[in-house]
Image (cartoon, rainbow, N blue to C red):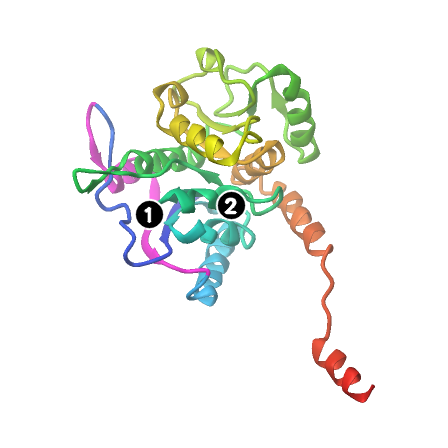
Amino acid sequence: MKRILFLGAGSGKDPGFDDVIIGDEKPVPYKYFMEDKGITVIDNIVESCHGCPDIMSHYSEQMQDLVEEGCQVVAVLQGGLYFALPSIQATQVTYPIISVPLDTIAFQGFIVPSGHAAIASVGIEEKVDGTLEQEQRAKALIVAERFLNLPNSDVQVVGNPEYLDELCTELEDLDINALKESDSAGLVLMYGTHNGVYDNINPNQVLIRADNDDTIPYLLYLKAAEERHKSKEFNIVPTVQVKGLKNLAIYAAKIISLQRPELRENLERIADKKYGTYQERNLIDEIKSRRVE
């Protein structure tokens, strides 16, 4: 089964990933890291949902075709201007997409309605002495690698007990078995309270979190969320953020569908249900009929 990492950007001016180094003890360029993990990298892809939506859709179709053929695909996308690219491309594919925002405005792009547009996000890269940091880009790549190399399709849920039953129900509706205690699960989902949660997480796991305090005044929450992305406390294991409990379950289904292809049917059903809430009208006929009147 081929594992593919798709790296895209909304503009040729975006920094890309060529300078990203991964590893503390033996740091290596990210391409060497991925090669060692058995992952094929498709990089330097420039696509724009605003400037060339047809090209974006073309890439989506190609990557989804590979998924249908049995490949595992994860995309890491970066950009700005509300960063619509990841959430719009997510409506065209079933595989997980990780957003790497380049500014505060772009960070808002991960805040999407519940549904098949669900994406995950890391924090905002900052410039230090004129040089762009790479911590968040590196984290996104590490998380992508762990998605592609999960040891199994088990999912562990942690966080505030009052929310866990609801999260488990959402997962079960997507045909995912959620475990509140697990020694084997590679994927951990966290919703609600964070205190003490990391104490029982294996360093080899990967974590997706969603906050339950995102209802506080917007600018205050944005500041708190960004601090969490860069806090050691919140990154004991590679961690990305998803918006809301329902999206947490849907995003987990996208990840697990890499190993369990039958879950794609559930994701497609969510997309079809959303599409069914809209009505297509023939505006030309409407205009012509009004002219007659």
- Residue at horizontal 48%, vertical 31%? 221
- Residue at horizontal 20%, vertical 34%? 28
Q: Position of residue 71 (x, y in %)?
A: 47, 47
Distance of mark 2 from mark 1, alpha carbons? 15 Å
Q: Residue furthest bottom?
A: 292
Q: Is residue 23 left or right of residue 192?
A: left
Which numbered circle lies on residue 243? none
Q: Is residue 194 left or right of residue 286?
A: left
- Residue at horizontal 71%, vertical 76%? 283
Discs 2, 1 touching: Cβ within 8 Å: no
Q: Position of residue 264 (x, y in %)?
A: 61, 45
Which numbered circle lies on residue 95? 2
Which numbered circle lies on residue 41? 1
> Amino acid under label 1?
Val
The relative height of residue 163 versus residue 286 in the rendered view (above or below) is: above
Compare residues 267 and 116 and report the one nearer the observer.
116
> Amino acid under label 2?
Tyr
Quarter of the rendering occupied by the C terminus: bottom right
Quarter of the rendering occupied by the N terminus: top left
Helix, strand or loop at label 2? It is loop
Q: Residue furthest right?
A: 293
Q: Position of residue 143 (x, y in %)?
A: 40, 33
Crowding near the residue tagged with mark 1, few <14, some 14–19, many ≥20 C-alpha atoms within 10 Å: some
Helix, strand or loop at label 1? It is strand
Quadrant housing residue 173: top right
Compare residues 16 and 43 and report the one nearer the observer.
16
The relative height of residue 83 versus residue 135 in the rendered view (above or below) is: below
Q: Position of residue 222 (x, y in %)?
A: 45, 34
Q: Is residue 276 left or right of residue 80?
A: right
Compare residues 6 and 123 and report the one nearer the observer.
123
- Which segment is the magenta one? 25-49
In magenta stretch: residue 70 = no
